[in-house]
């Protein structure tokens, strides 16, 4: 074959990448709902387990449907390897735990998804790993925090829920100077708008539950990195701890990837327009959207992303106004998912960021009047009418 999938455009990678047809030559990707595999002989099993014959042995290690999903996402991301996981948190957890041991140090941004923050604040310290939080928008804070025993740095950009932007290339340079690995949670930017590995990061993690499924059906996650990092840090730890993705969920995600580019671009066009509409409304104290010139991280966002993303953060000034806004929405759902085809809005302090101690919330931008709006695939005019009416009543 003269075609090299690595040279395909994104649209082609998303449809054709990783496709491995069975001898039946089915059109769609096959769903291999099997726990394991059989061998033609005892010698065949011996060769399979020794790695001499590279086939499948057990679905905790890999599975043909899961592998198609991993290969497609790796191709899209430009990564040597992808490891699919059961949830986004399984991906973040495995990505961090594989890199550290007692006595090591980890640095992360203050503004993180609630469960990611809990891992850093509560979980890693239980195993003797020291952790430091920094203002992720401040390079001098990263520089001051990273030290000789820092082994991992976790960046979420844009961050959840207030869309703070961290300069991936600059922080990677600081981390690499002490030999630390950089993990980027790329959920908000999606693989369509930001390629952290090309910017200098070592590991990318996704909650595939968000845009990659994008239709609210299944949970999943992924770790993308180099062969060398996978071999040294993740191969054994993931084999023996078992954060594996179900083949069924991998199959759903494969179909999700086929439309990822179309969905994310349309949702982003609508989000950018809606952010401008809402910024003009008198009930809105502040609109945060990375590609609006009034966003604090605008310059860096324009440098490292090719689109502003599907999520908008609003400040309506008080919890009362935020609740009135949410309750007045007729099309947009009140829900804590994001990246979905259905538009969804949530009040972070009482939902997604509930586990963040109250005194910490201002540091994360989690304010009482805050609303996070994930823009879906409905029409701009219907959404404009819905949010405008709800703002009028806020
Ligand atoms: C949702 C989310 C996660 C966790 O993903 P799950 O699939 O829910 O486990 C991690 N990071 C970010 C930024 C998220 O939005």
Image (tube, grey):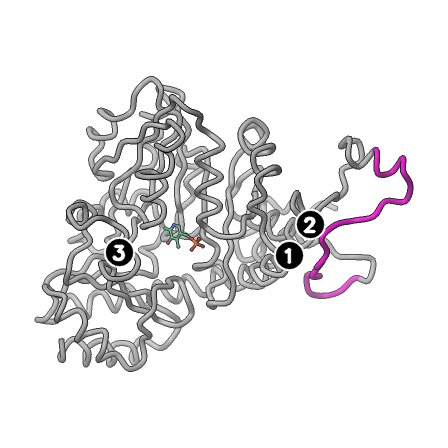
Q: Quadrant of residue 142?
A: top left
Majority SS type along the magenta span: loop
Instruction: Give the residue drawn at x 71%, y 61%.
Output: 30
Is 160 located above or below residue 242 in the figure? below
Residue 270 position, x and y percent, is: 32, 68
Q: CA distance from mark 1 to mark 3?
A: 32 Å
* Magenta highlight range: 25-46
Left or right: 156 as drawn, with respect to 316: right
Which residue appears farthest toward the top when viewing the image?
148
Q: Quadrant of residue 107?
A: top left
Numbered label attached to residue 354: 3
Is 52 located above or below residue 71 in the figure? above
Front disc: 3 or 2? 3
Q: Secondary structure at mark 2?
A: loop
Left or right: 120 as drawn, with respect to 23: left
Left or right: 231 as drawn, with respect to 365: right
Q: Pick the residue in front: 265 or 26.
A: 26
- Mark 3: few, some, or many residues within 10 Å (few <14, many ≥20)? some
Instruction: Give the residue drawn at x 82%, y 62%.
Output: 24
Earlier sequence position, callout 1 versus callout 2 = 2
Q: CA distance from mark 3 to mark 2?
A: 37 Å
Tell whether circle 1 marks a residue whose Cβ is less than 8 angstroms from ligand 1.
no
Numbered label attached to residue 247: 1
Q: Secondary structure at mark 3?
A: loop
Q: Is residue 36 magenta?
A: yes
Residue 355 position, x and y percent, is: 28, 52
Which residue carries the number 2 mark?
Answer: 63
């Amino acid at each position: 074959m003269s075609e090299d999938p690595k040279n395909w455009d994104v649209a082609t990678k998303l449809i054709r990448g990783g496709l491995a047809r069975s001898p039946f030559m089915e059109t769609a990707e096959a769903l291999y709902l099997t726990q394991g595999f059989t061998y033609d002989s005892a010698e065949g099993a011996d060769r399979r387990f020794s790695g001499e014959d590279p086939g499948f042995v057990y679905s905790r290690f890999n599975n043909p449907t899961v592998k198609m999903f991993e290969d497609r996402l790796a191709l899209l991301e430009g990564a040597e390897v992808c490891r699919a996981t059961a949830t986004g948190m399984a991906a973040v957890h495995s990505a961090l735990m594989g890199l550290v041991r007692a006595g090591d140090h980890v640095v992360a941004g203050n503004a993180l998804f609630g469960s990611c923050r809990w891992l850093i604040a509560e979980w890693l310290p239980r195993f003797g790993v020291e952790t430091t939080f920094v203002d992720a928008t401040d390079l001098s804070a990263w520089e001051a925090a990273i030290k000789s025993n820092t082994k991992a740095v976790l960046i979420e950009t844009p961050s959840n829920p207030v869309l703070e932007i961290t300069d991936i290339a600059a922080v990677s340079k600081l981390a690499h100077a002490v030999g630390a690995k950089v993990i980027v949670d790329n959920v908000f930017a999606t693989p369509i708008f930001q390629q952290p590995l090309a910017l200098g990061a070592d590991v990318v993690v996704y909650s595939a539950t968000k845009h990659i499924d994008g239709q609210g059906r299944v949970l999943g996650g992924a770790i993308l990195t180099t062969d060398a990092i996978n071999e040294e840090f993740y191969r054994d730890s993931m084999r023996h701890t078992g954060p594996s993705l179900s083949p069924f969920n991998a199959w759903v995600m494969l179909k999700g990837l086929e439309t990822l580019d179309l969905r994310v671009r349309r949702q982003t066009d609508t989000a950018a327009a809606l952010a401008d509409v809402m910024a003009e409304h008198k009930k809105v104290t502040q609109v945060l959207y990375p590609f609006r010139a009034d966003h604090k991280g605008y310059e860096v966002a324009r440098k490292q992303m090719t689109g502003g993303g599907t999520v908008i953060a609003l400040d309506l000034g008080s919890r009362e106004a935020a609740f009135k806004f949410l309750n007045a929405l007729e099309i947009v759902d009140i829900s804590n998912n994001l990246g979905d085809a259905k538009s969804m809005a949530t009040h972070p302090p009482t939902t997604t960021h509930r586990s963040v101690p109250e005194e910490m919330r201002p540091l994360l931008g989690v304010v009482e009047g805050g609303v996070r709006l994930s823009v879906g695939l409905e029409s701009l005019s219907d959404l404009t009418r819905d949010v405008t009416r709800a703002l009028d009543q806020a």
